[in-house]
Image: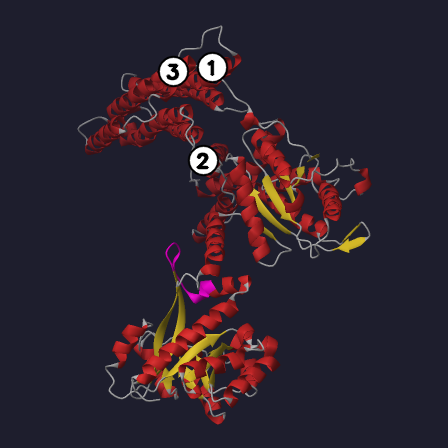
Amino acid sequence: MSVVRAPPPCPLTKATVVPVASVFRAAPLRASAHRPLLPEICVLAVAAVLIALGTAGPVPALAVVALAGAAASTLAGVRLSRLTLGPDLPDGSPPAGRMARRRAARPRRAAALLHAAVVTAGLTAAVLPLASAGYRSAAAAAGLAGTTALLGGGLFSLYRSRPSIRGRLHRLLDQAAPGVCLILTAWLLLPYAGVPAPLRLAVAVVLGLLAVDALAMLTGPGRDGGSARCRAGAGLTLLALVLLAALPAGPAAGRAALLAVPPLVVGVLLVAAGVRQVAQAAPTRQTALVWPRAVLPPVAVVLAVVHQLQVGLLPDRTAVLLALAVIPPLVARELFGAATLTGSEAPAATAPTPAPAESSGSTGRVALLGALAARPEPVSGALLVIDLHLTELPGRLVRDDVAAEAVRRARAVAADEDEVFDLAGSGLAVVSGSGPVLAYALGTRLLSALSRPYEVSGAVLRSRPSVGLAELGRGRPEDLFRQADLARRRAAQLGRDRVEWYDAYLEEQLVRRLDLERELPGAVARGELDLVYQPVLGLADRAPVGTEALLRWRNPVLGTVFPVELLPVAEDLDIMGELGVWVLDRACRQLADWTLGGRRLWMAVNVTTRELTSPDFVPRTAAVLEAYGVRPDQLVIEVAEPKVAAELPTVVARLAGLRSMGIRTALDDFRAEHASLAQLRRLPIDLLKVGPEVATAGGDPHRPLLDVVVTVAERLGLEVVAEELESAHQVEGAHRAGCRYGQGFELARPATAERVEAYFEEFPSTSR
């Protein structure tokens, strides 16, 4: 394990001079990168027509195999042959040119071997109709052996890097347990009547290995890359040749040979397409999918066992042994991953003394990005970004001492191969080679170690760290760091002292949150806030008795933002007071305009507990009413019931102060729980607002809970408003239960002041 303090030479700052001639010589490798897919589509169409003719009977099945295989292998051979024609650089070329030649020679070498493989596969399919019935299987087996050798050599040459022995063992252990599960699945599902057990087991092993290889290919970090396509094409080609080799002799082969046509045609075309993608260095997905490898094989085993039990069979001895064989790979995988952590609990004094801390956070970040760029492919592991978040604000010298101590603690819990980077004022970063499970465990250990008090320079400082995790892939180092840092920010938003993984949805939410935090502070000054009004109706006559003011933020970039998203951001930015002042002022001004028109309505305004408990809320509200000449009983102040318990005495005092002035009060989001019912007696309110869920929450269908709430409200002298009514059934149920007022989309939707005023015109007399 190493602690990096000074930046290594950044590979991005080195100027690599490549002769112009070498660029043009490398052009044949990319010449076919953007060719149209019309030839491939034509070959697939011809193969489909041939299969239809073979199924109908006019064309023999083996002739269909020969024609389709010849067409596909010819096109694939032409594609691959063009990739083998790139000339080498002259002997006197500079070193950069020789490096480019070696990089370009690898795809050409792989293209030559894979070209020979697809030609061999096509010839194998072509000679089957010419061979006698007794020699067809032998000819197919010979072609299978030759194609396998050539495909193996081509795929081996195609990889741009060779994993270390440790990396290969890590990959083997990762695939061992899923492989055994898939072998067990194949054993349980294969037919057993009349089939020797060794042959059945051999076939199960082959199918299981092919399945786990396909699963690794589809979920690996390069699943969109050319190498993955080549592997998929090679697997399909070999599957087709295996089917041809397994055909029975004589006319019994029949239409069974047609099963080999689709994998043969698609396989050779995929091989050619994959090599072309490698030659053009097309971008691939950067992160591996972990959950399919962990979930799909066990689920397949469970389904196979259920199928056996349904047909009346019990697992035999081989199935039990295969099930037990899953355990050793899992244990070995955990031991192999934890082997590097055996020294993590060693005393810190045994670790090498770290170098003095750098004072610049950018220096540590440059070193981190350089280390990420220098990691060999295939890249695996995780990046952890840690923010210490000291609860006190120490001086610079004390911060440096805290950083040095944090680095020492991180080195004590990290593995020897892990790298720890001091990001100075912004925290730490750890590059780990462990998989997702062990990386998360490392994050929790870092939380525990870094949250202990720091006794430095005669002071005791406390920290509330947050850890962000991002899985390493073949993306740019800057992108990987950004992903881990976004996850770290999410951990901080959720309360710190936690570890969070990065995912695309997380990034979308965090970017949205950052946009909201950036734009909201100036929304009032820019005139972006608006109010819409939702009428409150009497359920007996459906006449409007009041409205509720609902806040909307109409930003030209973010669109319309609703309170459920807006208010948490405003609370975190501590600007709820500014928004509340604006809402109350605008609502009272609109109420005054409607009152001048002769309407007697109330206006309900929502306030947070923090607004309500502020010392100046009651006198400020009275001043707004006096400024617009609004009667106090026309204003209703609503507070949400789930938020009042934390500051109940202060809330009671403020509500009582409002009622003493004649302002009416309402309790919103009433939950009708035991604590809420007991709390209801203490709150000086006039209106009780309940949602539709209360009507269906009771256990007695003949006396729903809403009836109980209405009865309690009547005894306390409260009027009940049923809100969020979205169907005629809910409206009728609320009316039958005794609710006097209702509010919801079924009755009237929120709208601008002009539209609500037009709605009021339908009622000649609007009285409270």
Tell me the distance, in whole angstroms, between the alpha carbons under discs 1 and 2: 32 Å
Q: Which residues are magenta?
A: 555-566
Q: Is residue 56 above or below residue 691?
A: above
Q: Amino acid at mark 3?
A: Phe
In x, y percent, where is residue 646? 60, 75
Tell me the distance, in whole angstroms, between the alpha carbons under discs 2 and 3: 37 Å
In x, y percent, where is residue 370? 59, 32
User: Residue 214 bears which disc, if any?
Assistant: 2
Q: Does residue 427 show up?
A: no
* Mark 1 or 3: the one toward you: 3
Give the residue at mark 1: 101
Marks 2 & 3, CB-CB < 8 Å contact:
no
Give the residue at mark 3: 24
Q: Residue furthest left?
A: 58
Marks 1 & 2, CB-CB < 8 Å contact:
no
* Mark 2 or 3: the one toward you: 3
Q: Amino acid at mark 1?
A: Arg
